[in-house]
Amino acid sequence: MLSRHEPCLFLESHLADDRRAAKVLLIGWDAADWKFINPLLDAGRMPNLSRLVDEGVIGNIATLRPCLSPILWTSIATGKTADKHGIAGFVEPIPDGSGVRLSSSTSRTTKAIWNILSQSQITSAVVNWYASHPAEPIRGTCISNRFFEGPPADPNRPWEVVPGSVHPESLLPIVAQFRMHPAELGRADIARFIPDIDRIDLTTDRRPAQLAAALARTVSVHSVATGIMEAEPWDFLAVYYDGLDVAGHQFMPYHPPQMPGVSDGDFATYQHVMRELYLFHDAMLGRLLDLAGPDTTVILVSDHGFHCDHLRPTQSAETEEAQAALWHRQYGIFAMRGPGVRQDERVYGANLLDITPTVLTLFGLPVGLDMDGRPLLQAFENPPGHLATIPSWDGVPGEAGTHPSELLQPAAKSQAAIEQLIALGYLPAASAEARQAVVIAVAESKFNLAVVHSSHGRERKAVSLLEGLHEEFPDQPRYALALAKSHANLGQHPQSRAIIEKLEARGWQSPETDLLAAAALFHEGKADLALARLADCERKYPPAAAIYTMIGNMCAARKNWHESAEAFEKSLALDGDDPLAHNGLAQALLRLCRYEPAAEHALRAVGLLFFFPQAHFNLGMAFLGMGEPDRAARSLELAVSQSPGFHEARHQLEMLNRSRE
């Protein structure tokens, strides 16, 4: 076994020859969204983010399913999906079965980036990362997410530190002073966000107090992070801010334009909160950039976006956690600047799993072949000619600052944190009851893993988990609906339709059941009935992009290209960031010999989802129709490289190459 300060020889050689960054600062803004940010950038209201954007690369970053913060931020920190990293939800059972606790670092089953760096003799600092409690004994500093919880109701009483939340423990009395109690924020502080604060009866309206709690936590996280940057050694620092997400679930309904159901009074009082919170984050970013200096590579990332426009949900979901998820948008933000990083450029096709491989590449370390992400080489001025890899970092010996395998965390007093998740809608209210909470936590973990498998094309594994859940909880429509979707994805439409019919017989109907029923009818050769079902869906529910996308696909299958194009245009009018709808419209326009707009929509599709062979193929065919064979060849080559079995793309590429000889 290697000693704590003895790196492997092959790591020494990589660090000596391939290191691209002296330091790396990774900043997480939960739920940050370019849709909200871009107007503020254009108006000059976010000068620090503008500086980061101008000096580096930016792009959308695709989220993962299920869109739950502990899963997503652990995927960011590991480069792996939840079935590999072990964090499957907000809460997990306490080992003795007496209740639940917040998901913990002792449940993560793979090394995080700070563990890999620790055993590579690179000093890290981690502040407030999701599921980082208890703090790991890494080479450097770790302040867990539970360090900031539990301010006493009476600000004059001692604010106890959660045991195990600070490493090394010698820093505890220092960093404890950086925490801000919500009561320290006066009316003048809140007035920036709520100008009419003096007119609010704070004994009956708890929203200002909820904002104060989110702000105090955000300030506390920022104070600890900047204090470490100034006083402690670090080569890599990761800090996570959750204020935009926490406040978004409470205050985004009041953001302009006024939503149906929001009173004039509430709209007037709370319409500025989210804008000012973004500007506050920009000010904090400025301080981080100043402390980091020009030689530090800075990465800013969010785990998902947050609807702020006409796509804000107005309908109610079946459960509170499903209602919260309706607000999340599939694209977050990505920005990176530093030595050797391209300037004022865009990066396409990034997803959350790419962050850890990119950080490893910056430090000259090999990427694990068991990681699901890839380094974002397009961000570099001079990408490495050969990407160093390793089978798995989990098999590399040496002190990585992980918890000992025998560590069993005692029951955590996390009731306040769990109640906050209930208030935000992430957990059902039943989670407050310990007896039910364990059952719910286990079931939801299985459900979340099934969603992970389904979203990565492992439908049979998803079906195996969902069948067990459906048998155990036959009255849970969410599990039944997910099982029906997985059957449909496997082409097992009779099984899907049988589940939907049982749901509808019990009076449970939704747009999703109608869409699945229509898909089953279509694949059974009953296209007219399927389209009639979708037309009825159009009449019954508010306009939805998914309905028009399915109509477009069905019309395309029947070669009704005009109707297909019309349906996809309606879909994109509702959600302009759907790569499937852009690709569907590109295909229809191709068939109508409208090559330039077809190319535009195919480009938009691959810009949103780079690993999309069919869209690259449609783009290549559009370029071919426009008389641009070189661009066509590049797009067709990408289609073939992403899908070697894509025979039509390979055939068109071979024909094109022969014609150019």
Image (tube, rainbow, N blue to C red):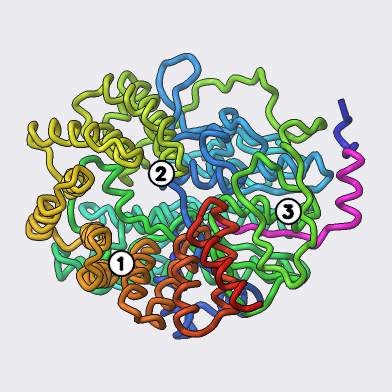
Residue at 26% across, 56% down: 202
Q: Amino acid at mark 1?
A: Asp
**Residue at the spot x=72%, y=39% of the render?**
115
Place residue 194 in its image quadrant. Answer: bottom left
Expressed as whole percent of the image width and height from the top left, the position of residue 106 reads 59, 28
Pair 2/3: label in front: 2
Q: Tell me whether the residue at label 2 lies in contact with that at label 3, contact meaning CB atoms closer than 8 angstroms.
A: no
Query: Up-down: is 307 above or below 537?
Result: below
- Residue that extends furthest to the top in the rendered view of this protein: 96
Question: What segment carries the magenta color?
Answer: 8-29
Observer-nearest of 12 and 49:
12
Q: Nearer the viewer, mark 1 or mark 2?
A: 1
Along the viewing direction, whichever of 518 and 523 lies nearer the viewer = 523
Residue 368 percent location from the top left of the image: 71, 43
Q: Earlier in the sequence, mark 3 or mark 1?
A: 3
Give the distance between the C-alpha atoms of the residues marked 3 and 1, in whole angstroms: 37 Å
Q: Name the residue that disc number 2 marks.
A: 66
* Residue 217 belongs to the span the image colors magenta: no
Q: Is residue 289 visible?
A: yes
Q: Quadrant of the N terminus?
A: top right
Left or right placement of residue 410 versus residue 295 in this view: left
- Crowding around mark 2 (Cα neighbors within 10 Å: few <14, some 14 to 19, many 20+) is many
Report which quarter residue 294 is drawn in. Answer: bottom right
For badge 2, the amino acid type reads Pro
Circle 3 residue = 236
CA separation in Å, label 2 and label 3? 28 Å
What is the distance, in whole Å, between disc 1 and disc 2 at their CAs?
Answer: 20 Å
Q: Quadrant of the C terminus?
A: bottom right
Residue beneath disc 1? 575
Q: Report the side of 371 relative to 621 (left or right).
A: right
